[in-house]
Amino acid sequence: AQSVAQPEDQVNVAEGNPLTVKCTYSVSGNPYLFWYVQYPNRGLQFLLKYITGDNLVKGSYGFEAEFNKSQTSFHLKKPSALVSDSALYFCAVRDPGSSNTGKLIFGQGTTLQVKP
Amino acid sequence: NAGVTQTPKFRILKIGQSMTLQCTQDMNHNYMYWYRQDPGMGLKLIYYSVGAGITDKGEVPNGYNVSRSTTEDFPLRLELAAPSQTSVYFCASSQQGSPLHFGNGTRLTVT
């Protein structure tokens, strides 16, 4: 079965330090991977996606993610965290059987807390 | 540029009542989705639609119904509300190959 796992419920980091939010996936075939961010009382906002090509993908707000096929991972990274990055982050994979529907399978979410 | 608009923002229902969660998008997207978000569970797909007149079940469709009479609108109907339907509901839309655009959600409590 297709699935996405975010092994950490919460990540704490000091402002200015690098951050990593982990994601692993299990899908058949080539994965289409996404990261979304959710601020309090708001919907999810798209950050970045990996479809094919370069394993390092750059996205919004200075975030990037590294696709690692051998480790089936797609970790979200940022070189220098900001307090305003504090939010709930979701990793998602497009259901490989749904190329014509766009359905996504979401991980459980990871709360990022950046302390000043 | 409104994007995806959901109404109402909040609602409290008694067990057995019914209601419709409204969702409309102004981006002319063909694909629309309803997800529910529960703490620590991520988002689960309830129903989706690939175009007007076409709907299909997602992962957790029981207790819900949808319709898609126009490209813009994708309402979600709860016929007999149950406490297990207490959740935050998100509507989203997209075009093929593009990221999902989400509304700001409807927080529903069933007591």
Image: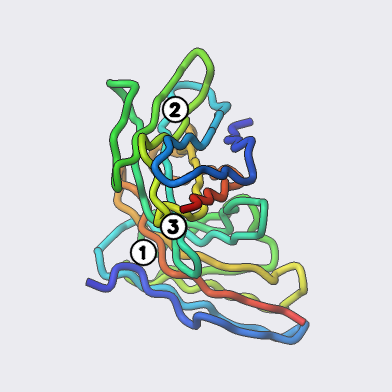
The residue at 57%/43% (across/down) is A11
**Which residue carries the number 3 mark?**
A44
Q: Nearer the viewer, mark 2 or mark 3?
A: 3
Q: Nearer the viewer, mark 3 or mark 1?
A: 3
Relative to A97, does residue A101 appear above or below in the rendering? Answer: below
Question: What amino acid does circle 2 point to?
Answer: Pro
**Between residues B96 and B67, which one lies in front from this camera angle?**
B96
Q: Do the residues under discs 1 and 2 have CB atoms within 8 angstroms?
A: no
| A63 relative position to B63: left or right | left
For residue B101, what is the image quadrant? bottom left
Secondary structure of residue under mark 1 = loop
- The residue lying furthest to the front in this view is A116
Q: Nearer the viewer, mark 1 or mark 2?
A: 2
The residue at 51%/62% (across/down) is B34
Q: Percent position (x, y) of residue A21?
A: 51, 37
Check if mark 1 and mark 2 are on a common chain: no
Chain identity of mark 3: A
The residue at 56%/29% (across/down) is A24
Q: Percent position (x, y) of residue A55?
A: 34, 21
Residue B54 seen in the figure: no
**Which residue carries the number 2 mark?**
A31
Label 1 Cα neighbours within 10 Å, binned few <14 / some 14-19 / many ≥20: some
Quadrant (top left/top right/bottom left/bottom right) for the N terminus of chain B: bottom left
Question: What amino acid does circle 1 point to?
Answer: Ala
Question: What amino acid does circle 3 point to?
Answer: Leu
- The residue lying furthest to the top in this view is A70
Give the distance between the C-alpha atoms of the residues marked 3 and 1, in whole angstroms: 24 Å
Secondary structure of residue under mark 3 = strand
Label 2 Cα neighbours within 10 Å, binned few <14 / some 14-19 / many ≥20: many
| A77 relative position to B110: left or right | left
